[in-house]
Image: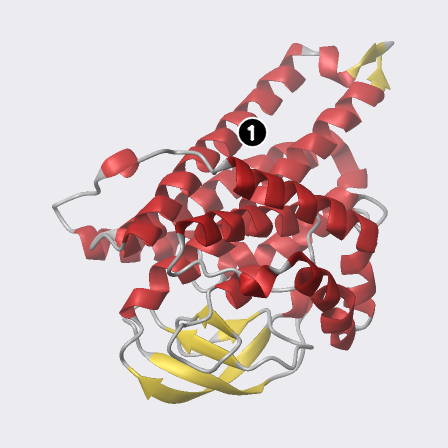
Amino acid sequence: MILDLSDDAKEFGHQALRAFESAGGDQLVQDAEAKPASREALVGPVLAGLGAWELDPRNDTDGLEAAAALCRSAGYWAVPYPVAERLAAPADLDLDGLTVVAGPRPSGALAGLESRWAAVTLDGARSQVTAQGPVGPAFVTELELSAIDDGGAGDVALGLVLPCWTLLGMLDRAIELTVSHVSLRKQFGQTLSSFQGVQFQLTEAEVERSGLDILAKYALWSAGSGKPEALDDALALRMSAIEAAEVVFRVCHQLHGAVGFCDETTLSWLSRYSQPLRRLPLGLSVTRDELTRRVGGSGLTGLFA
């Protein structure tokens, strides 16, 4: 077990960062929010040019690592496209992507896309998305489903892990933006970054982000190895990712002040578009309850132990 991505995967992620920046960078999500139906036109050609849909994260280790790196880069720019969900598409269904759903009102950030989608519950029940409701914040819409089968148990772990890599990319950017902000802003004749309290807050956020980085790599390896406890590891990663996001965005908003909630600030867009990743298919408390139900008294293995 090597808890790092390969050099090729890292380079692929760097190339994706540059490609998203060249395509519009932060402007992409603003344009897509104004016209949700433009999401495919804005981002689809960039992903196709990168060869994203040629990756095979289910059967190829290199493809799995490259997919994770791509999701992280997409999160960094808050790319308005469900990259992780497309990459998690089931191998045995002629559908374009997979979203994990839960609850009596299954939902996903799929509004404005014409792709054909599969949905899977944590218990492995698979359905096809046949219709969508009105467009909500961050492209979230309720989904109408038509049952397919109960053979999706092997789809769930990857469907949970890859979106966590997208969220990790958002945390990378949030901290980067905040470090830049406190290094420029002055108070009482000193930059904010020189105050010990600010340094403590940034350290707290970075500890959460860097810890999530390691756990994401472990859960990715677990999902790719086909381990029986891969779903437990994926749920543990999701729980850790939501907890880390709460700390990082709290610190970053506090250090930005009121401007951090204004549309003129990139942090505001990152925070807003992180919400579906943090709330769907399950929020923190329900994710924790589900993980507790699954592992019972046996506990977790590996890094999550």
Tell me where residue 21 appears, x and y as whole percent: 78, 48
SS under mark 1: helix
300 sits to left or right of 217: left
Q: Residue at x 42, y 52 (%)?
A: 284
Tell me where residue 8 appears, x and y as whole percent: 54, 41
Instruction: Answer above or below: position of 79 versus 144.
Output: above
- Kindly identify the amino acid type of the residue bearing the numbered disc 1: Ala
96 sits to left or right of 270: left
**The quarter of the displayed image where residue 127 is located:** bottom left
100 sits to left or right of 33: left
Tell me where residue 143 appears, x and y as whole percent: 52, 81
Residue at the disc numbered 1:
205
**The quarter of the displayed image where residue 150 is located:** bottom left
Residue 80 in view here: no
Instruction: Answer above or below: position of 202 versus 42.
Output: above
Q: Residue at x 76, y 40 (%)?
A: 260
